[in-house]
Image (spheres, rainbow, N blue to C red):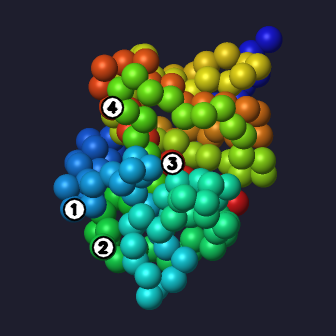
């Protein structure tokens, strides 16, 4: 039986503005080798959009040994963008806010993120991009401006079985 692990919440943005501001951010700060950029930092002295990228469990990642709650300073390089507005008005306590890319014909490793909720806005996607849960099927998150809450306690991966890159804005709830 399929559990309801991804559900829409009552928070929406203008999808065209999200796409536009994402493209502008990526012109200035292209995806790194972890296919991410981060809009919040751990310190006002370090406004590196790559500081919060990767996985805290992996020693080769900038995020190594940091916690979601360490990320609480909005990066001023992204002032006057939809990312700043989301940071100011999001209804839940946040950690990292990242653009994350799954390249065409790729997926993440199967994992879980106990105790963390992820909120997703699809920026660029199609029906061949989905979240796959080990024991609970797959879910497609449409690029409709709606924020979707994702249960990450269950083992999951993001799959891109298409020929185009899949990009989501992902907010870590803490």
Q: Which mark is residue 165?
A: 4
Residue 26 in the figure: left or right of residue 89: left
- The residue closer to the viewer here, 138 or 119, is 138
- Judged from the image, the secondary structure of the residue bearing numbered disc 4 is loop
Q: Are marks 3 and 4 in contact (CB under 8 Å)?
A: no
Q: Are marks 2 and 4 in contact (CB under 8 Å)?
A: no
- The residue located at (68%, 24%) in the rendering is 133
Q: Which residue is mark 3?
A: 170
Q: Relative to 77, does residue 61 appear above or below in the rendering?
A: above
Where the N terminus falls, by quadrant?
A: top right
Q: Work out whether mark 3 precedes mark 4 in sequence or the reverse, and give the earlier one.
A: 4
Front disc: 3 or 4: 4
Q: Distance of mark 4 from mark 1, alpha carbons?
A: 19 Å
Q: Distance of mark 3 from mark 1, alpha carbons?
A: 19 Å
- Judged from the image, the secondary structure of the residue bearing numbered disc 1 is helix
Q: Work out whether mark 2 precedes mark 3 in sequence or the reverse, and give the earlier one.
A: 2
Q: Which residue is mark 2?
A: 77
- The residue located at (56%, 38%) in the rendering is 148
Residue 41 in the figure: left or right of residue 152: left
Q: Work out whether mark 3 precedes mark 1 in sequence or the reverse, and give the earlier one.
A: 1
Q: Distance of mark 3 from mark 4, alpha carbons?
A: 15 Å
Q: Badge 2: few (under 14), some or many (20 or more) residues near its Cα, within 10 Å?
A: some
Residue 72 in the figure: left or right of residue 111: left
Q: Distance of mark 2 from mark 1, alpha carbons?
A: 9 Å
Q: Which residue is mark 1?
A: 28
Q: Is residue 59 visible?
A: yes
Residue 23 in the figure: left or right of residue 95: left
Q: Badge 4: few (under 14), some or many (20 or more) residues near its Cα, within 10 Å?
A: some
Q: Badge 3: few (under 14), some or many (20 or more) residues near its Cα, within 10 Å?
A: many
Counting every numbered tag in the picture gives 4
Q: Work out whether mark 4 precedes mark 1 in sequence or the reverse, and give the earlier one.
A: 1
């Amino acid at each position: 039986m399929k559990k309801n692990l991804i559900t829409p919440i009552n928070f929406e943005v203008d999808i065209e503005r999200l796409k536009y501001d994402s493209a502008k951010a990526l012109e200035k700060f292209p995806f790194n080798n972890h296919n991410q950029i981060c809009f919040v930092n751990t310190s006002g002295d370090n406004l590196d959009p790559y500081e919060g990228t990767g996985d805290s469990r992996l020693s080769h990642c900038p995020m190594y040994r940091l916690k979601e709650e360490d990320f609480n300073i909005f990066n001023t390089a992204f002032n006057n963008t939809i990312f700043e507005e989301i940071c100011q008005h999001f209804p839940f306590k946040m950690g990292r806010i990242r653009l994350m890319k799954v390249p065409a014909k790729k997926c993440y490793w199967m994992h879980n993120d106990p105790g963390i909720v992820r909120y997703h806005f699809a920026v660029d996607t199609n029906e061949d991009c989905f979240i796959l849960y080990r024991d609970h099927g797959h879910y497609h998150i449409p690029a409709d401006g709606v924020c979707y809450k994702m249960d990450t306690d269950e083992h999951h991966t993001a799959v891109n079985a298409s020929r185009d890159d899949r990009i989501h804005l992902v907010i870590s709830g803490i």
